[in-house]
Amino acid sequence: MGVPFEALLPFGIIIASFSVGSAGLWAVKRYANEGKKARWNRDLWDRQMMERDYRLTGTKRGQSSNHEAPQGFELSNPWKLEKRIF
């Protein structure tokens, strides 16, 4: 006995919903990461390098190949002080 054709319409709607949702999620992630793969498992070093890249180029994923830092960069200090309660 075959599958009745009435069951194929809801099945198609479900498949289309999952496809549209996953494509939208992929597009948003790609747009947020400037066309590069999303970063995962970031540690403190990665976050500091992202902050440095942001200060150098203005974007978190951008990198610069200039051999000299831009004006004002020598005064910005990337090191943060620890806040401890004694």
Image (tube, grey):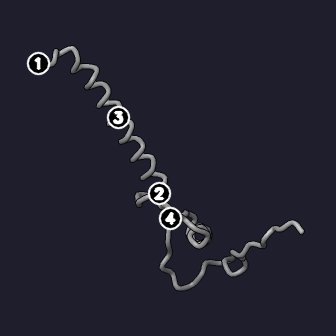
Report the front residue among 53 and 70: 53
Pointers 2 and 4 in contact (C-beta within 8 Å):
yes
Callout 1: SS: loop
- Residue most toward the front? 1
The CA span between labels 1 and 3 is: 25 Å
Q: Tell us which disc is closer to us: 2 or 3.
A: 3
Where does label 3 land, which residue?
A: 18
Q: What residue is pinned by disc 4?
A: 61
Q: Position of residue 54 (x, y in %)?
A: 59, 67
- The residue wearing badge 1 is 2
Compare marks 1 and 3 and give the one earlier in the sequence.
1
Q: Which amino acid lies under the numbered mark 4 shown in the image of this protein?
A: Arg
- Kindly state the secondary structure of the residue where label 2 is placed: loop
Q: Residues within 10 Å of mark 1 (few under 14, many from 20)?
A: few
Residues at marks 3 and 4, CA–CA distance in whole angstroms: 29 Å
Q: Which residue is mark 2?
A: 33
